[in-house]
Image (tube, rainbow, N blue to C red):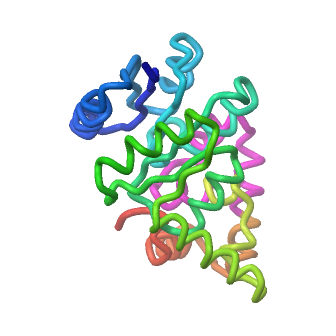
Amino acid sequence: MIKVLLADDHSIVRAGLRRIIEDSGDMQVVAEAADGKEALARIRSQRPDVAVIDISMPDMDGLEVIRRIKHEIPQLPILVLTMHAEQQYVVRAIEAGAMGYVTKQSAPEKLVDAIRKVNAGSRYLTAEAAEALAVQVARGQKGGSALDSLSTRELQVLRRLALGHTNREIASAYNISIKTVDTYRFRLLKKLNLRNNAELSRFAIQNNLVEP
């Protein structure tokens, strides 16, 4: 049996995913998590064969979970299952160490297939994720955009600022100083040619980094 961890902040979504996974016959959900910090703790204690992680989670987002887990347990296959098909998230997730990327709009059987593939050591991208990755590569060859120039940490800080988090909350989430958060904010304003947090929020919504 393939032991799976599910990390998603919606209990109804987790229940549905658990049913899909365990109906496969060769998989078992050994742990669930509702936020990034809980996901880290469950992975450390349960040692699943595959971790299925959402990107948008409270306390610690999926990108940060991937980064930390790949540092601690580099051999653990991580599969991202998220509503975000935007190339920014696909590229960042793969760069962080995810072995696969599946959007929640995909058919249930694709999730099961993806878990089997990453557990066997292969990569898996749904058509939506592969297209987003191809678009990002093409944009990069043409010089990219201001958004493409952001580092993963800058993208994370941008998203949290857009969600209304304070500098102190952001500092706590990523274990950095408040001064460092302010530095990231300054860089974001400069790189994106924006003036304040309100414009950062509008930019994030326009680029589908957060929901309006």
Q: Please check the rendered image and state whether residue 171 is part of the magenta-colored stretch, yes or no.
A: yes
The picture places residue 184, in percent across and down from the top left corner, at 73, 57
Q: In which quarter of the image is residue 24?
A: top left
Q: In which quarter of the image is the C terminus?
A: bottom left
Q: Please check the rendered image and state whether residue 195 is part of the magenta-colored stretch, yes or no.
A: no
User: Does 121 sit above or below residue 109?
Assistant: above
The picture places residue 50, in percent across and down from the top left corner, at 52, 29
The picture places residue 61, in percent across and down from the top left corner, at 53, 42
User: Which residues lie in the magenta part?
Assistant: 157-185
Residue shown at the point (64%, 60%) measured from the top left:
155
The picture places residue 169, in percent across and down from the top left corner, at 56, 40
Q: Is residue 43 left or right of residue 138?
A: left
Q: Is residue 189 left or right of residue 39?
A: right
Residue shown at the point (70%, 28%) measured from the top left:
75
Question: 137 or 196, which is in the foreground?
Answer: 137
Residue shown at the point (56%, 24%) measured from the top left:
40
Q: In which quarter of the image is the N terminus?
A: top left
Residue shown at the point (62%, 75%) measured from the top left:
134
